[in-house]
Amino acid sequence: MTVSKSLPVRPSLESLRKQAKKLARDIAAGDAGAIARARAHLPNVDLPLTQRNAQLVIAREYGYAGWQDLTAEVSKRLGKGLEWAVAQARRIIHDNDVERLKQLLAEYPALLSWQGHDFDSKGGLIGIATGAYGDAGDPERERWFTRAASAELLIDAGAVVTASACEGLLESRARGLLQLFQHKGLLPRTLKFFAALGDLDTVRTVLDESGDDLAAVTEALTIACGFEHEAVASLLLDRAIALDPELGTHVDGSVGRPAFIQYFIDSRPGHATEVGAWKAFVMEQVSRAVCSWSGHVTSVTSPSGDSDLTAFVRLLQREPWLLGEALVEFQADIIGRATLNDRGEFITALLEPRAARSRESR
């Protein structure tokens, strides 16, 4: 490779880009010197040059095999070597290019302990490899949204595995990665992770030893349902009812425990840890009534299948806490859903009793 230039101590990436653009323009204009420079490094490429090939010529004139090698050297000289390496790692992990990732880790071992601040990088490179932007609850979607091969390479290379990376597996329902982390001994030995794994015997043991925290049991219940581990969920529901008999009154007095679990498996209602399993269950029913387009909703509190609006009103009447100040955000969400679905009658049904309660409290 013929080296005709040398980088300054503090090179400018912008200047190098401008050099490539000028080279491409000069060649397009028929400049003999520019054409000769291109032929010296790319003898078989058709002219005029693309911007990418012009950058390749510039890189080789400075003695580098390619543009990425040149920009890496610029970053190093400007003290941004790790920053550049992280950007490269993101791209490589997205491509699940294990061999290139090995090379990058060898060149930048600090990547193994790097921790970012963005949503997808709080768990470092492991978080980038395992984070999912959507539900990864089946094998195909897990392949779409996560990068298992890169994750395993990072783990074996000694990358720092944070609690947030492990929590992300629960949120995304990435079963394959959950098993990988378990095999590598990386999962916290807590009730919710045993529930996610469907480890019935260990869940039973943990409950026998320390299963008196209702919030922890409820969280594990929702996670077991999210991963469709019905037997584990049944065991956890029984314990939750033992800790909160009122929950048992609600569940056993409506659809019963098996159907309650099945509903959690099918719908995965949120907020259960914060508000409790029953309230989360009812809130999901309310949301479904508003969003249903079928004209009917088979509610657990109305098993005959009342119309959407009738079921909605009955839920508000039977569960007056739905109109409380503590659930203002939920009520606003319901109004938003009703607005989007052009269902103004639901907004009226929600606001009228709430206004009446406000007047009574004055």
Image: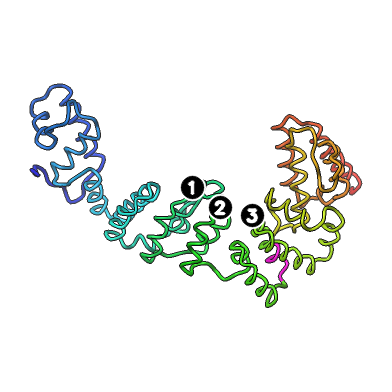
Instruction: Identify the element where label 3 is drawn.
Output: helix
Q: Which mark, residue 273?
A: none
- Distance CA(mark 2)–CA(mark 3): 10 Å
Q: Which of marks 2 and 3 is nearer the N terminus?
A: 2
Q: Which mark, residue 172?
A: 2
Give above or below for 353 relative to 340: below
Assess whether mark 2 and mark 1 are in contact (beta carbons under 8 angstroms): yes
Q: Name the residue under label 3.
A: 226
Name the residue nearer the viewer: 269 or 317.
Answer: 269
Q: How many labels does the image show?
A: 3
Residue 190 relative to residue 254: left or right: left
Kind of residue at disc 1: Phe
Residue 319 relative to residue 159: left or right: right
Residue 359 % position (x, y): 89, 44
| Residue at 75% from the left image edge and 65% from the top image edge | 240
Q: Check disc 2: other Cα within 10 Å, few if <14, some if 14-19, many if 20+.
A: many
Q: Which of marks 1 and 2 is nearer the N terminus?
A: 1
Q: Which residue lies furthest to the bottom in this view?
A: 209
| Residue at 23% from the left image edge and 43% from the top image edge | 67
Residue 243 relative to residue 199: left or right: right
Queried whether the magenta region covers residue 321, the answer comes back as no
Kind of residue at disc 3: Gly
Q: Check disc 3: other Cα within 10 Å, few if <14, some if 14-19, many if 20+.
A: many
Image quarter of residue 351? top right
Q: Mark 1 points at which residue?
A: 145
Quadrant location, the N terminus: top left
Queried whether the magenta region covers residue 215, the answer comes back as yes
Give above or below for 44 relative to 126: above
Q: Give the range drawn in magenta.
A: 213-218
Q: Earlier in the sequence, mark 3 or mark 1?
A: 1
Instruction: Identify the element where label 1 is drawn.
Output: helix
Q: Check disc 1: other Cα within 10 Å, few if <14, some if 14-19, many if 20+.
A: some
